Image (spheres, grey):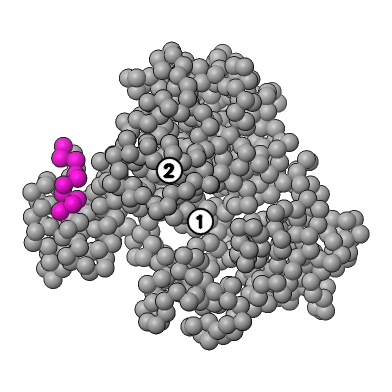
Amino acid sequence: MTLCPRCGAAVDARVLARRAEIYPPLIARIQADNPTWLNEGLCPTCMMQYAQQLVTERSVFSLNVATDPHTTFPYYHPAEETALSQPERLLDYPSFSGRGVTIAFLDSGFFPHPDLLAADCRLDPMPKWETLERSEVQDLLQGEPSRLIHYVDLNDGDILEGTDQPSLWDTARLSWHGQMTSVLAAGNGLMSGGRFRGYAPEANVLPIKVSRSNGSIPESEILAGLQWLLREENWQRYGVRVVNISVGGDFPRAWEESELSLAAEALSERGVLVLAAAGNSGSPVLLPPAQTPSVLTVGGYEDANQRGDLLAPRGLSHCSQYHHNYGEVMGPDGREQKPEILGLARFVPSPLLPATPTFREAHAIGALRDTLSGGDDEHARAIMAHWQRIMHVDDPRLPDQETLLSLATRFDSQEEQTLHEVWYALRKRMNAHKWIHDFYQHVDGTSVAVAQVAAVAAQMFQANPRLTGRQVKTILMATAMEMPHWPAEQRGSGIVQPGAAVTAALRAAGGVGYGLPQSATRVSESRLRKWIFQGKVPRAAVLRTGSHYHHFTYFSYYAPHARAVSLIGSFNNWVPDAMPLTRGPNGWWHGALDLEPGIYPYRFWCVDARYPHGSGRRDPENPFFTESGLRTYHSVIPIE
């Protein structure tokens, strides 16, 4: 045991929060309160206190309208002027990353973004991406292991294959949309320090370019992409279990009359899950293949860039429906309403195309914003001059170069008027690029929403490879968060719930959790004894008895490669190893506590080859959480 450098309480040194683990907006505050604190870490209790300070300081209303000009995305604390990541807004099951599953993307074009590199890539030191030309980025990425397992370019009737095709490395505008969808689903967040990862950060990616050289995407090209997957069972050759289609056909018609829809049906018959974006016009019109019965058609919702505590009181009050297309189709079981499910469709972090003028300017914007916030006048002047040199001179949204250079020359933080002019110019450029990070912008649309649901499907196939695409579709719809107050013809089954969907896949027939109870379940003593008698829970899993309430909380964690797993939380002063879980069959670890009424934040402490001293992990099956002061949440057990 050691002492927390802030409160002096005894704490296990392994759970002290280090700088790399701390939620970035809290670091400056910790240092201001504790001038001698370097990186000794803080105890979980102190970190939660800092987190709650931040929570209480957040505005009820967005602060984006408090600036001149207004920023394009909502935020609620001056230190959090960015877009939240996908996992911060909808909790997922991070134990499953899509590993071994391939998602095929049909889109206008692609680029092998660094966030699609494999987990074993070795970029040491991390390159300064903003300085690299396109050819340098290509040379660097081609020397690293990638999760792009193949590439297909349907080039005006020709079929070009292989990751060395020039169109894959083109940074023209057609490449952006497919880069966006593939990274939203399968990006590992490399260029954001892991923060802006997708739900399937280890999935394989198969990009299929379906646009013509003039930029058009006719239905015949989309059809050709599906036909390529069907030809000689290429879908099976490359391990494709999920097909993401973020583009639509030429005009609406019955699915039985559409070759594109029939091809999607053929893939579905082979067990593949095909997903399509509903469209963004808000009209009762569906284009192929979105009107195909077997296709999972995805609409959108908006969450105002807030955390996804949908189960909390007022948790749904900030959500609203996106303006997606909708309609009714005749399926094998009668009339079906589409879209069937909704994904997050606004203010979603997405990577900028590397080695482009926009990419370089976004980095300069971030650097200038940081220096202005820190009061570093000399550095700010240098960055402003750099910004002026790399601007697009033909962009009418820009302040002209002479104005910007003049600002850089006479900038002085003591001159309030000049400072206002600088911030005004800076925010105009932030807005022009939808800036949220040096290398990322925020995006919207059902193309954005469908990519997230496709990633959750990849997690589900990894969790239970025996599932068919139809079964995955059914589970996704069954576990969605219902939105009964939204129009019935547009809401589908509700908002996708990534963690719940993967949990259900694990416990479906053929899954390693089949027949097991879910973690964080309150259970009577008699029911717990029955589970033990049935062999669902090991007898040694009962960690503590003696409560007068005769009710237990059952915990389980899937960690087949772990050497040890224990519970840490406010109920045991966050001490690792004090409450070890018992290993059962199929890689599950079990435990049961008889906790008295209260609210208990907790984590699993997992020891494995990657973390031989252990690391704390949120309970992925528990939808209740609290902010921890770390980059990830604590799970919470509320007991009445």
Query: Earlier along the polypeptide chain: callout 2 or callout 1?
Result: 1
Does 409 sit left or right of 171 as displayed? left
Answer yes or no: is residue 283 visible: no
Residue assigned mark 2: 114
The label on residue 88 is 1
Which residue: 49% across, 83% down? Answer: 5
Height in image: 294 above or below 384?
A: above
Residue drawn at 37 percent across, 82 percent down: 35
Majority secondary structure in the magenta region: helix
Question: Badge 2: few (under 14), some or many (20 or more) residues near its Cα, within 10 Å?
Answer: many
Q: Is residue 601 found left or right of 429 in the rendered image? A: right
Q: Is residue 267 left or right of residue 71?
A: right
Residue drawn at x 16%, y 65% as measured from the top left: 378
View extreme (right): residue:
533
Residue 607 left/right relative to 420:
right
- Image coordinates for residue 453, horizontal then vertical, percent: 56, 40
Q: Does the rendering let one see residue 508?
A: yes
- Say which quadrant the N terminus sits in: bottom right
